[in-house]
Image (cartoon, helix red, strand yellow):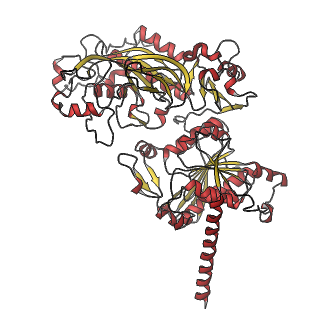
């Protein structure tokens, strides 16, 4: 019998290295995230298929937080009892309601309550079904309902859309890299005052061009990424 | 001569139908509808009733044949059968009328649509019925046919029905126009182990198709097991096939495609559905559980094939067992129910969770940055708190981060030992206790 020694996995989350989504499967969870995931899996409910799906989704969310630049995505907790629930901090410029001098206030992060119900696997759900912005207050976006701050990331989210894609959509929507400011659009807006304000301030959109997986202020943010050769 | 007599026959048939129709309308005016006490008041069921003495029932035996191999006592199954019809269009509308002719115990019809001008091409209706609600229309006609049958109607989408509405039925028959409704019904029939018959037509190929899932266990097939890429695409695109065509479309809503078929293909599908139902209820012939039956008009051939479960089917393949609570559920705690379900001996399983009626458990109410603990059950849309800052009412939302359905013991904590009445669920009709990929339905 030939026993081959396994090569140690190359880190894809080291400092200075820009991650790619395709590297997500290669990420080894750090001890903190591994413990969080193991605890959540132990208390996971539902049938075998749903438990399996939740395990994969939760693992990907935690991997994404490691793959992204430091601080971009911090997972506070993951709950798999029924729906997949996670409290996460997303480092992204978030527009808040302008002050009395009509000057826009920008928060540097958002605390998001994320819910991924079992129905999301089998049927399309409306855009506001997944995220609730818990902080900051007075988010000034057409797709965020004032008060309870449910965040609409699309008109309708197709069945089975992975959590990692929903997080990327939320990032794009909060930073206004993807935006819908037409209050007459059939998709609708939750905050028509914000929609009108942004129509008059289109030059301020987007709030950042930094992609989710790029470090803030990196030069590459403004340039197309070079194509890397596939590793053997 | 032959032509004249044919024409006369034609006219007399029309006269007969018109007379029938006017008679139906006359009696309809005497009819009243009332809220059904048994079925969910939030679901909006109405019972069709006739004025006293409006019609006397005819004995079913006057026309029911002596089926070969059937024991007389088995006919009791028809007297006891409670049927839930989802959709009341060109196929299921006819099923409703056929079913009332069998004088079943109860028929509940659910459809949100109205009869349109085009409906006369495919439905069992007349121009005078245009703008009538379909469920009510067929419910009224069914009640006239069989006054002894309890007829309930819900003029709304099936998604509005409570799980207990399915539990109150013995068999579900569906012929609807959208995949989301099909998926919703498939899931609930699976949970409650309710047999499900689905009928459909494909006009261009003259196909009538009937599928039957017994849902005896979670290991069997369900309608969504048969969904392919095309079905998922239509599901994601919110496609709805409507008999009324695309004129009912509202801006930004679903892609609505008209159902194209001839009326007799629709009635063929309805007839095959009824045949399937009769064979299952009376135990006639070979079992057709978990099978598909197709008739092709081009070849006049009929084929049957088994339906197989797809391992990665997105529907939750869990079948709940049933228990009846001797005291109202509002007086019991969730922990008592967990023990009765066999999950509570010793330490609670880590994945123990509960579904309480159509309610959500509102852990907290968040608005304007203030998070107030609420910790009680509420119906979606029900006000649970008021924001101390903006003074807006905060309502329970099924899809909010702090609302749970199902709710786990980890969230409930010590509330699991309090009676449901103290948690805002005093009038709850059912509770599902779930753990380890199994569940118990309490009513």
Classify residue B71 by image quadrant: bottom right
The residue at the point 53 percent across, 36 percent down is: B313
Instruction: For the C terminus of chain A, give its image quadrant.
Output: top left
- In this orientation, does residue B350 appear? yes
Classify residue B29 by image quadrant: bottom right
Is residue B43 or residue A204 the one in the foreground? B43
Judge whether B412 appears above or below B172 on screen.
Answer: above
Q: Position of residue B97 (x, y in %)?
A: 65, 59
Q: Tell me if A134 is positioned left or right of B165 in this view.
A: left
- In this orientation, does residue B272 appear? no
Is residue B442 or residue B297 the one in the foreground? B442
The residue at the point 43 percent across, 38 percent down is: A124
The residue at the point 64 percent across, 15 percent down is: B348
Judge whether A109 appears above or below B104 on screen.
Answer: above
Q: Position of residue B263 (x, y in %)?
A: 54, 65
Is residue B313 or residue B394 the one in the foreground? B394
Q: Position of residue B156 (x, y in %)?
A: 53, 47
For this orientation, the residue located farthest to the top is A31
């Amino acid at each position: 019998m030939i026993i081959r020694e396994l090569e140690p996995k190359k880190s894809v989350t080291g400092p200075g290295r820009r991650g790619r989504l395709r590297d997500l499967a290669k990420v080894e969870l750090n001890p903190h995230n591994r413990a969080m995931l193991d605890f959540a899996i132990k208390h996971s409910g539902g049938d075998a298929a749903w438990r399996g799906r939740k395990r994969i989704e939760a693992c990907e969310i935690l991997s994404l937080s490691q793959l992204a630049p430091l601080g971009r995505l911090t997972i506070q907790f993951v709950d798999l009892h029924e729906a997949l629930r996670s409290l996460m901090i997303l480092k992204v410029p978030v527009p808040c309601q302008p002050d009395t001098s009509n000057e826009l206030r920008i928060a540097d992060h958002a605390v998001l309550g994320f819910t991924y119900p079992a129905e999301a696997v089998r049927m399309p759900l409306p855009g506001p079904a997944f995220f609730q912005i818990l902080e900051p207050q007075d988010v000034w976006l057409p797709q965020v309902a004032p008060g309870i701050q449910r965040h609409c990331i699309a008109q309708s989210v197709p069945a089975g859309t992975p959590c990692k894609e929903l997080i990327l959509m939320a990032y794009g929507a909060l930073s206004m890299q993807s935006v819908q400011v037409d209050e007459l659009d059939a998709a609708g807006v939750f905050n028509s005052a914000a929609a009108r304000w942004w129509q008059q301030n289109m030059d301020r959109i987007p709030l950042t061009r930094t992609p989710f997986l790029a470090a803030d202020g990196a030069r590459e943010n403004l340039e197309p990424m070079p194509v890397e050769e596939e590793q053997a | 001569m032959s032509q004249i007599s044919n024409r006369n026959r034609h006219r007399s048939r029309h006269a007969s139908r018109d007379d029938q129709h006017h008679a139906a309308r006359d009696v309809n005016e005497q009819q009243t509808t009332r809220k059904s006490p048994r079925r969910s008041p939030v679901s909006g069921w109405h019972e069709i009733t006739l004025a006293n003495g409006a019609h006397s029932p005819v004995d079913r035996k006057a026309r029911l044949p002596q089926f070969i191999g059937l024991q007389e006592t088995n006919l009791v199954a028809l007297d006891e059968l409670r049927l839930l019809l989802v959709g009341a269009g060109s196929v299921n509308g006819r099923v409703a009328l056929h079913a009332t002719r069998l004088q079943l115990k109860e028929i509940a019809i659910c459809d949100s649509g109205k009869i349109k001008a085009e409906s006369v091409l495919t439905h069992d209706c007349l121009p005078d019925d245009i703008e009538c609600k379909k469920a009510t229309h067929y419910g009224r006609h069914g009640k006239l046919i069989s006054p002894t049958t309890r007829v309930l109607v819900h003029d709304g989408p099936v998604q509005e029905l409570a799980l207990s509405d399915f539990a109150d039925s013995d068999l579900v028959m569906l012929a609807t126009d959208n995949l989301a409704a099909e998926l919703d019904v498939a899931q609930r029939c699976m949970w409650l182990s309710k047999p499900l018959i689905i009928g459909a037509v494909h006009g261009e190929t003259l196909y009538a198709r009937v599928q039957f899932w017994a849902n005896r266990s979670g290991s069997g097939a369900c309608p969504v097991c048969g969904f392919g890429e095309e079905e998922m695409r239509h599901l994601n695109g919110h496609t709805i096939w409507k008999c009324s065509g695309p004129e009912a479309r509202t801006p930004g809503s679903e892609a609505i495609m008209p159902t194209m078929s001839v009326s007799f293909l629709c009635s063929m599908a309805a007839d095959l559905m009824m045949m399937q139902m009769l064979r299952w209820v009376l135990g006639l012939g070979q079992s057709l559980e978990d099978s598909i039956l197709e008739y092709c008009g081009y070849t006049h051939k009929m084929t049957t094939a088994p339906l197989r479960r797809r391992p990665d089917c997105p529907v939750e393949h869990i079948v709940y067992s049933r228990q009846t609570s001797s005291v109202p559920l509002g007086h019991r705690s969730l922990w008592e129910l967990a023990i009765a379900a066999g999950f509570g001996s010793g330490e609670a399983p880590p994945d123990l969770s509960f579904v309480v009626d159509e309610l959500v458990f509102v852990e907290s109410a968040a608005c304007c940055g203030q998070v107030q603990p609420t910790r009680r059950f509420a119906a979606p849309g029900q006000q649970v708190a008021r924001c101390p800052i903006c003074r807006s009412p905060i309502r329970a939302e099924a899809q909010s981060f702090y609302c749970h359905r199902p709710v786990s013991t980890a969230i409930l904590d010590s509330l699991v030992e309090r009676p449901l009445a103290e948690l805002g669920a005093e009038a709850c009709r059912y509770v599902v206790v779930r753990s380890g990929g199994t569940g118990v339905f309490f009513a």
